Amino acid sequence: MAGEVQDNVWPLPKFYFSVQLGDDASINFQEVNGLESETKPIEYRHGNSPVFYPIKMPGLGRVGNVTMRKGIFVNDARFWTYYNEIKMNTIKRRTVVVNLLDETGAPKMVWTLNNAWPTKITGTDLKSEGNEVAVESIELAFETLTVSAP
């Protein structure tokens, strides 16, 4: 209705974000997938329970892998350099930070991937008849996920 005052609280758009792969430099990604965490339930029923259903308790937590995609730029082999750090059973684990930004560029939601390391790198597909941008992806395994709203 005309003349009504609306609340200035709006959901954040998901297209304005930044990623830091364990250093202070921010990398521009096209897409980040897999920011998820879950807890497996443990079902238990003791023998003399009058209820014929088990109780459910929280069990071990689990996180999946995160996949990030970005365009390939000239002289930018950062993914491959990072991936080559895991050879010969020496893994350099990093803290990866994903920031969801507001219109001023300030972080409003922060996902922190602790002890992350690359498990897979996928280069672009090459087609002589295509006109798409070359996109590469990196998949990161990590141990814990922390979500905060600064």
Image (cartoon, helix red, strand yellow):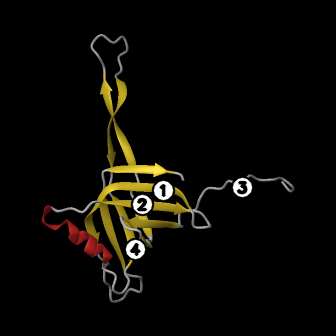
Quarter of the image holding residue 67? bottom left
Nearer to us in this view, 40 or 16 = 16
Circle 1/circle 4 CB separation < 8 Å: no
| Mark nearer the N terminus (3 vs 4) | 3
Quarter of the image holding residue 98? bottom left
Amino acid bearing label 3 = Asn
Badge 1 element = strand
**Residue at the disc numbered 1:** 110
Q: Position of residue 63 (x, y in %)?
A: 34, 49
Residue at 47% x, 67% y: name it. 18
Amino acid bearing label 4 = Lys
Residue at 41% x, 86% y: name it. 131
Label 2 environment density (alpha carbons within 10 Å; few <14, some 14–19, many ≥20): many
Mark drawn on residue 97: 2
| Mark nearer the N terminus (2 vs 3) | 3
| Mark nearer the N terminus (3 vs 1) | 3
**Residue at the disc numbered 3:** 8
Label 3 environment density (alpha carbons within 10 Å; few <14, some 14–19, many ≥20): few
Nearer to us in this view, 136 or 150 = 150
**Residue at the disc numbered 4:** 70
Report, in whole angstroms, how far the alpha carbon at label 2 lies from the one at label 4.
Answer: 16 Å
Badge 3 element = loop
Q: Position of residue 56 (x, y in %)?
A: 36, 27
Circle 1/circle 2 CB separation < 8 Å: yes
Report, in whole angstroms, how far the alpha carbon at label 1 lies from the one at label 4.
Answer: 20 Å
Amino acid bearing label 1 = Val
Between tags 3 and 1, which lies in front? 1
Report, in whole angstroms, how far the alpha carbon at label 1 lies from the one at label 2.
Answer: 7 Å
Circle 2/circle 3 CB separation < 8 Å: no
